[in-house]
Image: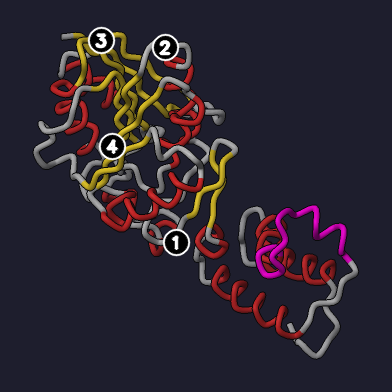
Amino acid sequence: MSSENTWTIKKLVDWSANYLKEKGFDDARLNAELLICHTLNYKNRIDLYLHYDKPLRESELNSFKALFKRRLNREPLQYIIGEAEFMGLKFKVDKRVLIPRPETEILVEAVIKTCKNYPNSLDILDIGVGSGNIAISLAKFIPAANVTGIDASRPAIEVAKTNVDANGVSDRIDLKQLNVFDDVSGLPKYDVIVSNPPYISRNEFLGIQEEIRLYEPHSATTDDSDGLTYHRRIADVARNIFKENGWLFLEIAYNQSAEVTKICSEFGYYKIETIKDYGDNDRVIKARWST
């Protein structure tokens, strides 16, 4: 790609999309369009189509080249542009936090469905708050919800705080740096406990795509064990910080339903059910606790 040629937006979209496709990238055209939008400070992709014949200045082309090179190195698009969308909301993301994923919306939707008509104040704990996508979405869509988000990572808490403020829910979300494997007895009692824990096993982690393996926080993706370490811990400690009755919601990998169901059952949970995602994969375990 030479800066000596005249590059219009259309020409650059077509060329970069084709190049990414040839290199085996999924959603190549979407990647190209979003990178160009970010380069030009366009808010929406429709702006590209409204200015398709606009020639790029050399400085703009150089900026795009730098971003494009990062994507070719398999850096996730969301880290390059600095944001991700989740439940229709915008979240700032960088290498300090896991990138919110569409399948986690199934987890959030399951909580909302169970709790949206709750008549009184509802106390929710989000374990492993990360970017804040789960906690913030629950605060936005459940009017009665007051959410505590905990994470072992101080940098993750910093990102979550930025997103809490940006989404206007700072009055109903409390963030704490706390590792779920430490003493959590100082936490108050909750009606709902929700988590998208690290569930990629050590063996599976070696074979996942480079975007995750090389760039996303290691501790947020794998437990360096069988993928179930956090499910066991959360199911155990949750029993002591539930109110009289509580709901536990855990995101799982496509092949973990039987194991996590067994874990919950052995810890005394009941009404255990598996919720599938839109790809018909097992995605969420919902379980009831009663003292």
Instruction: Give percent across and percent down for residue 192.
Output: 31, 21
The mark that comes first in sequence, 2 or 3, is 2
| Pair 1/2: label in front | 2
Residue type pointed to by label 3: Tyr
In screen coordinates, is 95 left or right of 69? Answer: left
Q: Residue sitting at 32 percent across and 45 percent down? A: 200
Assign a secondary structure to mark 2. Answer: loop
Residue type pointed to by label 4: Ile
Is the residue marked by circle 3 packed among few (<14), some (14-19), or many (20+) residues within 10 Å?
Answer: some
Task: Using the image as rendered, state which of residue 174 and residue 26 is in the foreground.
Answer: 174
Residue, disc 3:
270
Alpha carbon separation for disc pair 3 and 4: 21 Å
Residue, disc 4:
127
Colour approach in the figure: secondary structure
Label of residue 234 in the image:
none
Instruction: Give percent across and percent down for residue 58.
Output: 75, 85
The mark that comes first in sequence, 2 or 4, is 2
Instruction: Give percent across and percent down for residue 246.
Output: 27, 15
Q: Which residues are magenta?
A: 37-52
Label of residue 210 in the image:
1
Q: Residue furthest bottom?
A: 4
Residue, disc 2:
118
Alpha carbon separation for disc pair 1 and 2: 42 Å
In screen coordinates, is 185 left or right of 6? Answer: left
The reply to whether discs 1 and 4 touch (Cβ–Cβ < 8 Å) is: no
Alpha carbon separation for disc pair 3 and 1: 39 Å
Q: Residue sitting at 72 percent across and 78 percent down? A: 60
Query: Is 22 placed above or below 178 here?
Result: below
Q: Residue furthest front?
A: 171
